[in-house]
Structures are given as C-alpha cells and as structure tokens.
C-alpha cells in the first residue's frame, strides 16, 4: 500500500529531447516499512524509496507519515556525467479523496506549482474519513537547491506530481515548466513527505489544522524562535484587544445560543491534531516581548520621518475641502524618482489621490503616527493625524453610505478634485458604487480611534449612520453585497456572496461594545454564520483583490468559476484574515466556543500563506512574512502587519505558543522591505536599483518582494505606498505596544 491513500499506482517521468517520457521501474521491492523502486533512464539512474516514520502505522495520534527520497545518479559504466533537465515522481489518485488545497494554481498545460510558492507548502486531499497531504521537505531545499522544485495535482488525469525542473514566472503570476539541460557529476536528490490523518466524527470540511500543525512542528517552530518568557500572566479566557469573554456578552434581549446556531446543527470539532478550544486560563509568556518592540521602534521613526519630514513636500498632502475643512494625509503612491530636489516630484505613477480603503487606509496609518507623535513629543505629527481624521470624516454621506477615494483634479490640484464612491480596484463601471468593505473598514478604524486615541464627538454619529444603512442591506441569508449604489438604484452582481461579509462582523462587533445594541449583535452573528456555512467549506476566498488588482481576470481565471485543472476556486488570503477576526468577534458576542474553533480553523488556512522558512532563492529575509493569493507570487507582503495582530489575539485567547511565534515573526517581517541601515540586504538592493538613495530616504518601503508588475529590478519595485507599507507596519507596532 502506498503511504498516501490514493491508490497503488506510482510512476516516474523523465525529461529528455524536449519531451517528458515515462520510465518503468526495473526494480520494485516492497517491504514492511516501505518500498524501493529503481529505474534506468539511459542517461541516468533513478531510485525512489520511502519509509514510514517510527515504523509501520501511526507515528502520532491519528497520523501516519512517510518520507520519500528520490536520487538521480549518473548511469553505471558511463563517464560519470549526469545530463539532466527534469524528473518527476507521480501518483495516480484512484481513491475518493478530493483535492481541497494547493498553494498556487496552474490553469494551463505545462504549468506547475513552483517552489517560489513554497511558503508553507502542501497539496491536501480529503474525503469523509481521511485527510492526506504531500508536503515538500523545506529543510532539504534550504540545504541545497541546485534545481528548482515543482509539484502539482490536476483533476483531469488525477496525477499528483513532485520533482525537479526549471520553470519561469509567466503572466500575473503562474509558473511554467522550462526544462534546461545541465551536466553534473554529483547525484541530485529531493525529498518530500506523504502524510495521512484519520478524521474525527463530524469534522468539518476543509479543516486544515492538522496540515498546518505538521508544517509548524516539522519546520516552522525551529525557524521562528521566540524569547523565553521572563514572566507569566493568567488572562481571562478569551481576553482580546480590550475585552474579555467569560460568558455571553450580546446585548440584552439577544440569545447567544439562538443567534449562533441559526436554526442548524452545531458544526463538528477540529481534527485529531487541531488546536481545538482550550479550557481554563492559559499561562501566557510576556507578550509582546519588550525587547522585540524596542528593536522595531527605529523602523517606525524612519517611516514617519520619511513621510512627514524628509519627503513631506511630496508625500504629505494638505488642503481645504469646499466647506473649508482642513484635511490631510500621505498621498497614495510615491515613486523613487520623486525624491525631493530632483525635479520630478510631480511625476505620478497613478492619479494623485488619498484613500480610505481596505488596503490603502490613511486613517489606519494616522492612528499610528498619532500615538507615536504623542510618545515622541512631536505635536506636528499628532496634528497631521488629526487632519487625516478630518479627511475621513469629510466624506459626504448619502443615507449613511460614503466614498473612500478622493482624486486630485486634472490640473494636479486637490481643490479641483472630487470624491469617487469606489477606488480604482473594482469592476468596470463601478465608480459610483460604494464598496461596503471599504466603508466598514474605515468605520472600524474610526471606532478604534474613538476608543484608543480621542473620543471625537463626530465619530459615533458618522459610524452609526452608516451602520443603520448597513443593517438594511443585509440579506435574509446573513450575507451582504459587495458594491451598492448609494441612492439605492442598484446592487452589483460581483462578490454578492463573499468573505467580505466578515469585515462587517468586525465593525458591528466593535460598535456593539462601544454602543450596545441587540441589532448589531444579531446582525454580526448572522453574518458570521453565513461565512461559516457558505465560504469556509468551499474555500471560496474571493474578494476584490482576487480579480480587480494586478492579478486580473483572463480566460483561465474568472470570477465565481473554479480553476479547471485543480477544481479549486481562485483565492486571496485577505478574506481569510477578515474571517479569523469575524469569528473572534462572534465568540466575544456569544460566548459560544464553536466560534473560537471556527476562528482557529480559518487562521490555520491563513497560516498556509505564512513563510515559515528562509527561502534560498531570495536575497532578503523571508521568515514570518506572507504571500497573497493562488495566482500571484510576491513574498513579504504588507498584509503581514495585520495578520500579526490576529495571531496576537488568538495567542491571548488560547495560550497556543505557535500563535505567539507567528505574531512576533509576522511583525518583524512587516519591516523587512524598508530602506534603512538595519536591513543590510534590502538596503544593498535599493542602492543598486535606485543609486540616488541615501540616508534622507530611510523609511522608503516597497510593499513586498518579487512583485511582477513590470517594474521590479532584482525583485524590487519602483514605488512605495505609505498606507500599505511602512505606515501600515508602524501602525501595527503601535497596537502591539498598546498591549
């Protein structure tokens, strides 16, 4: 029996003469604890061997693991030279197991999952009784990568493959096999694991916690160490960001159990190795670690010094609205060529604009420099933060709905500019549709401002007007549309059922804590139930970024359609983040542990996007950072500063030390791409790509690494976005410091 319950058929593919050919094993030996195959490719000899870890049977509760090693050697009796261009092992899925997760999609013939998508890599299958996965041996790749590693699974031929072959990034962004022959005298080796878990009765579909836990224990915990605890505390069970859960806390008149169950049966629990729900008060290490926070403070000062001092004549924008209100903010996008004093300050990459949107949120950044300005005694920074608050509150409301994107006029002047209901990352013809995600995200930050910085009297009326309209837009199934016209004349068909609904749970939960209202609680719980029942089981993590950003739709990637070669939806991890946050809110509202369990299930899937190792093919640090989606391949993306805060809260709720480590390393990674002396590797690349950079530019911060938008050199792009880069990272650091 093969170590993965797919069936009995295994094969070997060898690339030669411009084609792939199958090689029949010349030796096949099955033993009690494994098997051995040998094959002769003419120009090479291949050996495939596998063995159960800890002998035949389970090596952990409910789990069996086999290590597979492939060795490719020069042929016996030859001149000792190996001519190699590609080799793959394949398994044929003859079982009822269905593929439920791949880290990257390969929509056309000849495409694969290349190792530049190996962040927390696995290809996962399941049926009613079993979950199984192929997991690359990251330690082996890190120790020596002579040829890129590739893997894939396609539903048409039901083949699961793993091997070595050169590939190229194509489109935005996929990996296409490009075999190139090399000669070598030393053998090539690659390793991977085949793992099976027995599912528990009633376990939910696509509960990937067992896979996440295997990856963490095998690779992550060793690569992401944290400081030993200097003290320990016993927080209330469920202590999260200023509130604690020790029983139902929904508003009076709302039954927690009734609202959670929604008339259905309770969902199943996690698998044998899932984190589950902890009982009792966890003992927590000092967290966040004070020495870590001190080490990151210089990065925040670089960020604010760059935007508000040294580059302020380009980055900081201040003007009056038609009603005379003074507003301000850091402009949306700034290129390296716009460095003050070089004469190219007005050469904008995209329209000159200010945003309060789910990515680019000037209010979130201002939250950070409001707190840092107070710490540093920089009244000018705190005053600028107040102008950014003015900008958010100046958005005109129409029955509660409001725009989040302001673009300067064609003459480049703010005074001749105008509001657009939705920013440019949207379907065509949606300029006058309000993106509810953006509006709820802005209101969420307004409430955090009210709670943490200053209880400005304008904030609650603004947010509550919006909340009233939001409640009216909720469907009977609990979900919310994505784009609507403010005048009520239309609702977009795009993302009508999506994880963007989770962001509204976040808002309504926080609003309910500040201004209790049973309607907010009931609406939030209905919305959370919608996502739990309609999004999570199918992995349908489609949001605006999945299709209307740089990785756009094309014939092989269409909104609402599954990828033909994998049977999976295109997905982006932003929706997983909102959902982990939403389930945390639902737990706080109801006290029902099911929501916390669902939250950990979502967080496990998010964790499969976290980089749990130092990738040898990148010259910058990668440990702890995040990728984005299954059709793009940037690393160290700015969203990691948001995920860091989510892990922080789940650590406080559960005491799971892996969440602590993931939080701290995600926060570290949030500053990896900043130009400054502390980041020696990144600094060297910046100065090679932008030779005019010097100490005046410390704080310039590309949003990620390996972004294929046509401008990068050596993996580094030409621009920075303060609100999705250094400003966002510094805001998360401020939240960590608040505790």
Image (cartoon, helix red, strand yellow):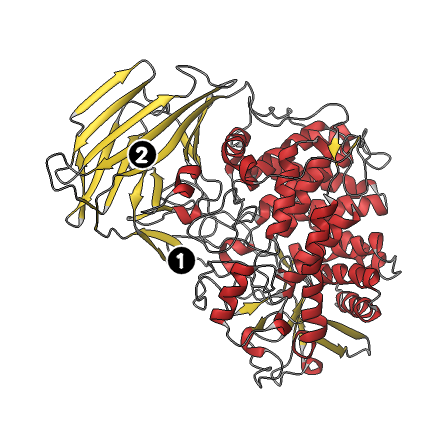
Say whether residue 552 is left or right of residue 27.
right
Residue at numbered disc 1: 554
Give the spatial CA distance, label 1 vs label 2.
Answer: 25 Å
Say whether residue 282 is left or right of residue 479.
right
**Do the residues bearing badges 1 and 2 touch, measured as CB atoms within 8 Å?**
no
Total number of numbered labels?
Answer: 2
Residue at numbered disc 2: 158
Tell me which residue sits at (76%, 50%) in the image.
737
288 or 560, which is in the foreground? 288
Position of the C terminus, as image quadrant, is: top right
Where residue 215 sits in the image (x, y, percent)? 50, 34
The answer to whether 277 is drawn above or below residue 523 in the figure is above
Frontmost of labels 1 and 2 is: 2
Tell me which residue sits at (53%, 58%) in the image.
704
482 or 353, which is in the foreground? 353
Secondary structure state at the residue bearing disc 2: loop
Neighbor class of circle 1 (other Cα within 10 Å; few <14, some 14-19, many 20+) is few
Say whether residue 456 is left or right of residue 176.
right
Tell me which residue sits at (40%, 15%) in the image.
55
Where residue 465 sits in the image (x, y, percent)? 80, 57
Neighbor class of circle 2 (other Cα within 10 Å; few <14, some 14-19, many 20+) is some
583 or 524, which is in the foreground? 583
């Amino acid at each position: 029996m093969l170590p993965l319950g797919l069936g009995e058929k295994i094969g070997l593919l060898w690339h030669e003469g411009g084609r792939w050919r199958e090689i029949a094993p010349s030796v096949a030996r099955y033993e009690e604890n494994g098997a051995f195959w040998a094959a002769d490719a003419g120009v090479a000899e291949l050996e495939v061997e596998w063995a159960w870890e800890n002998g035949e049977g389970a090596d952990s509760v409910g789990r069996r693991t086999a290590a597979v090693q492939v060795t490719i050697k020069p042929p016996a009796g030859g001149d000792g030279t190996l001519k190699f261009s590609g080799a793959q092992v394949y398994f044929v899925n003859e079982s009822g197991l269905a593929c439920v997760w791949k880290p990257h999609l390969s929509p056309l013939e000849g495409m694969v999952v290349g190792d530049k998508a190996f962040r927390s890599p696995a290809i996962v299958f399941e049926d009613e009784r079993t979950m199984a996965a192929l997991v690359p041996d990251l330690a082996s790749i890190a120790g020596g990568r002579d040829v890129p590693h590739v893997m894939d699974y396609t539903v048409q031929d039901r083949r699961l493959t793993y091997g070595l072959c050169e590939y190229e990034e194509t489109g935005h962004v996929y990996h296409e096999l490009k075999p190139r022959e090399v000669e070598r005298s030393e053998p090539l080796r690659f390793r991977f694991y085949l793992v099976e878990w027995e599912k528990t009765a009633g376990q939910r579909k696509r509960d990937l916690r067992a896979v996440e836990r295997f990856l963490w224990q095998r690779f992550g915990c060793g690569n992401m160490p944290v400081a030993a605890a200097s003290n320990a505390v016993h927080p209330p069970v469920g202590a999260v960001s200023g509130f604690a859960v020790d029983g139902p806390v929904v508003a009076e008149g709302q039954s927690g159990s009734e609202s959670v169950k929604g008339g259905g049966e309770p969902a199943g629990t996690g698998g044998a190795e899932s984190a589950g729900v902890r009982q009792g008060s966890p003992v927590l290490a000092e967290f966040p670690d004070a020495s870590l926070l001190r080490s990151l403070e210089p990065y925040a000062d670089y960020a604010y010094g760059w935007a508000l001092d040294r580059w302020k004549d380009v980055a900081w924008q201040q003007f009056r609205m038609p009603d005379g209100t003074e507003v301000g903010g850091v402009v949306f996008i700034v290129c390296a060529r716009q460095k003050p004093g070089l004469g190219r300050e007005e050469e904008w990459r995209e329209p000159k604009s200010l945003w309060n949107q789910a990515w680019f949120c000037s209010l979130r950044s201002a939250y950070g420099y409001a707190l840092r300005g107070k710490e540093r005694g920089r009244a000018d920074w705190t005053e600028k933060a107040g102008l950014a608050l003015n900008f958010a509150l100046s958005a005109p409301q129409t029955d509660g709905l409001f725009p989040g994107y302001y673009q300067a006029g064609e003459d480049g002047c703010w005074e001749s500019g105008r509001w657009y209901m939705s920013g440019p990352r949207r379907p065509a013809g949606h300029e006058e549709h309000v993106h509810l995600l953006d509006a709820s995200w802005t209101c969420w930050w307004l409430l955090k401002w009210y709670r943490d910085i200053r209880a400005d009297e304008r904030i609650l009326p603004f947010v509550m007007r919006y909340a009233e309209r939001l409640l009216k837009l909720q469907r009977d199934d609990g979900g919310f549309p994505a784009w609507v016209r403010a005048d009520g004349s239309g609702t977009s068909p795009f993302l009508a059922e999506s994880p963007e609904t989770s962001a509204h749970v976040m808002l309504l939960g926080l609003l309910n804590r500040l201004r209790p209202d049973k309607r907010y609680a009931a609406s939030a719980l209905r919305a959370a139930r919608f996502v739990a029942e309609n999004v999570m089981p199918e992995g349908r993590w489609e949001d605006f970024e999945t299709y209307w950003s740089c990785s756009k739709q094309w014939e092989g990637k269409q909104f609402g359609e599954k990828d033909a070669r994998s049977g999976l939806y295109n997905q982006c991890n932003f929706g997983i983040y909102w959902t982990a946050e939403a389930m945390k809110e639902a737990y706080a509202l109801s006290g029902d542990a099911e929501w916390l369990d669902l939250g950990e299930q979502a967080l496990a899937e998010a964790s499969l996007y976290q980089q749990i190792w130092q990738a040898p093919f990148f010259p910058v640090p990668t440990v702890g950072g995040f990728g984005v989606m299954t059709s793009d391949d940037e690393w160290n993306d700015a969203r990691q500063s948001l995920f860091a805060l989510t892990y922080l809260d789940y650590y406080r709720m559960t005491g799971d030390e892996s969440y602590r480590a993931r939080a701290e390393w995600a926060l570290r990674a949030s500053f990896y791409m900043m130009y400054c002396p502390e980041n020696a590797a990144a600094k060297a690349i910046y100065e090679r790509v932008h030779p005019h950079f010097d100490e005046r530019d410390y704080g310039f911060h590309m949003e990620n690494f390996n972004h294929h938008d046509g401008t990068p050199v050596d993996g580094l792009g030409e621009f920075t976005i303060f609100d999705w880069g250094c400003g966002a990272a510094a805001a998360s650091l401020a939240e960590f410091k608040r505790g």
